[in-house]
Amino acid sequence: MSFSLAGKTALVTGANTGIGQAIAVAMGEAGATVICAGRSSCAETVGMISDARELTLDLADPMAARDVFAAQTVDILVNNAGIIRRNDSVDFTEADWDDVMDVNLKAVFFTCQAFAKAVLARKGTGKIVNIASLLSFQGGIRVPSYTASKHGVAGLTKILTNEWAAKGINVNAIAPGYIETNNTAALRADPERNKAILDRIPAGRWGAAKDIAGTAVFLSSPAADYVHGAVFNVDGGWLAR
């Protein structure tokens, strides 16, 4: 029962595909009611879960979730929605910088804030799981705004822990390794980059979205009640090499 989410409601952003979809499905399998949030349809994901509903949420507006948690009780928040833009740093545009930072960092903070306000107002408890990245630890190549935003997610996870842990809110993050998603399609399509990445992963393969889901369920469950401010790398051993 330590790993059960029965009786809990989880909101997962970016739940229409990839890692977000896998996490939403796993939350449902663990017993949670799942709110599948995305700017595009999450109907496919909802259809894969016994107790789920859809919420249109476009986090290109960082304040999009400001009223979501006042209208309903949500126990678990998974901040998965994110975007990426690629270009050499000398050519990177202000628009590409701002677009990524708005979705990947500013929206994460203000969604966490809205969630925490609602949890504290009802004197309850809650779990926040942020999706960070290996680029929360490393620099990467040709993704300056993504790298900055994911470093920021790791930092937010720690500061919010410092402020909210004693008030009943756990804040943690998962740093996925190289996962087969839309965001990594360009890397997998480049033979040289694909080989270089695979050669460094001790597990010998790209990760699947479902490889992230179990950690998200753990961090949302009673089994992780004393886990605060952690950034878990789920990377097939990438950072160990």
Image (cartoon, rainbow, N blue to C red):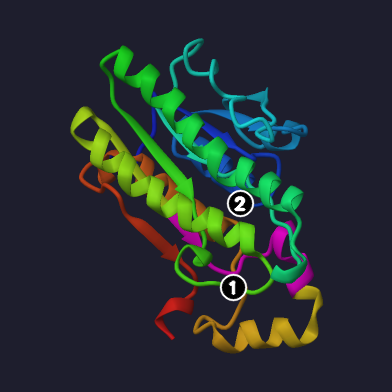
Which residue is tagged 1? Answer: 140
Residue type at tag 1: Gly
The magenta stretch spans residue 198: no
Which residue shows up at 37% across the image and 57% down it? Answer: 231
Q: Residue at x 61, y 34 (%)?
A: 49
Q: Which residue is located at x 71 percent, y 65 percent?
A: 184
Q: Which mark is residue 234?
A: none
Q: Nearer the viewer, residue 96 or 170?
A: 96
Q: How far, Cα to Cα, is label 1 from label 2?
A: 20 Å
For residue 190, above or below residue 34: below
Q: Is residue 148 above or below residue 156?
A: below
Is 179 magenta? The answer is yes
Tag 1 secondary structure: loop
Q: Residue at x 30, y 39 (%)?
A: 170
Q: Amino acid at mark 2?
A: Ile
Q: Which residues are magenta?
A: 174-187
Asked if residue 214 shows in the view, the reply is: no
Q: Is residue 201 left or right of residue 56?
A: left
Q: Give the quarter of the image for residue 221.
A: top left
Q: Position of residue 159 (x, y in %)?
A: 31, 44
| Count of marks placed on residues | 2
Residue 4 as seen in the image, left or right of residue 227: right
Q: Using a 10 Å C-alpha cutoff, classify the residue at mark 2 as few (fewer than 14 neighbours), some (14 to 19) or many (20 or more).
A: many
Q: Residue 162's spot in the image, x, y percent?
A: 24, 42
The residue singled out by tag 2 in the image is 19
* Quadrant position of the N terminus in the picture: top left
Q: Is residue 4 visible?
A: yes
Residue 210 image position (x, y, % from top left): 57, 56
Q: Quadrant of the C terminus?
A: bottom left
Side of 94 where 216 appears, left or right = left
- Quadrant assignment, res 76: top left
- Residue 16: percent from left, percent from top: 70, 40
